[in-house]
Image (cartoon, rainbow, N blue to C red):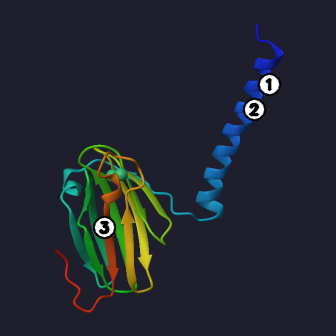
Amino acid sequence: MINKFEKYVFTITAIVIMLFVFSLVYARSGKRADVPDCLPYDKAYTIPAVKQIDSNLYQVYAVAQMWQFQPSEIYVPVGSTVDFFVTSKDVVHGFNIYDKNVNMMAVYGNINKTTVKFDKPGVYKITCHEYCGVGHQNMQAEVIVNYPDAKNN
Ligand code: CUA
């Protein structure tokens, strides 16, 4: 037997869930937002790397761990499209690229992927925005777009 108040709460809950589902669908199709993909786990992605796939396509295997990102400096030419494959070696970290509307989680045992185009030269900060311990505020890396002595380490 449910009372009036419970019925009310159920109704509100159902409406909120429908709104949530609708906004996801809308963001994905209507707004063409790039919702990150979750890929099958593959150990290859746990080794930090910057790979050039063709003249303007790069892949970055970004590995978060307490309290750093690797690679910490990613050099690409202007106009590059970069696929980021993000994972963690320990706890949950965040992966936020300043100015690029990238807001991802780095999770142990998971690979999250997103694609970013860098049309303007500059230094794009990557920061951890998920509290992960005493060194949290030091966790950052950089995407360096179009520096003449571009070199990946
Ligand atoms: Cu990693 Cu906060």
- Check the picture and name the quadrant holding the N terminus: top right
Mark-to-mark CA distance, 2 and 3:
42 Å
Q: Is residue 14 above or below residue 8?
A: below
Residue beneath the point at 28% across and 61% down? 62
Residue 141: image tag: 3
Instruction: Give residue 31's position: percent from left, percent from top.
Output: 63, 64
- Check the picture and name the quadrant holding the C terminus: bottom left
Instruction: Give residue 138's position: percent from left, percent from top.
Output: 31, 59
Q: The residue tagged with tag 2: helix, strand or loop?
A: helix
Residue 8: image tag: 1
The residue positioned farthest toward the front in the image shown? 134
Which circle's residue, 2 or 3, is located before the other in the chain?
Answer: 2
Nearest to the observer: residue 52 or residue 147: 147
Q: The residue tagged with tag 3: helix, strand or loop?
A: strand
Q: In this view, does 72 lie above or below 78?
A: above
Of the residues tagged 3 and 1, which is closer to the observer?
3
User: What residue sits right under mark 2 in the picture?
Assistant: 12
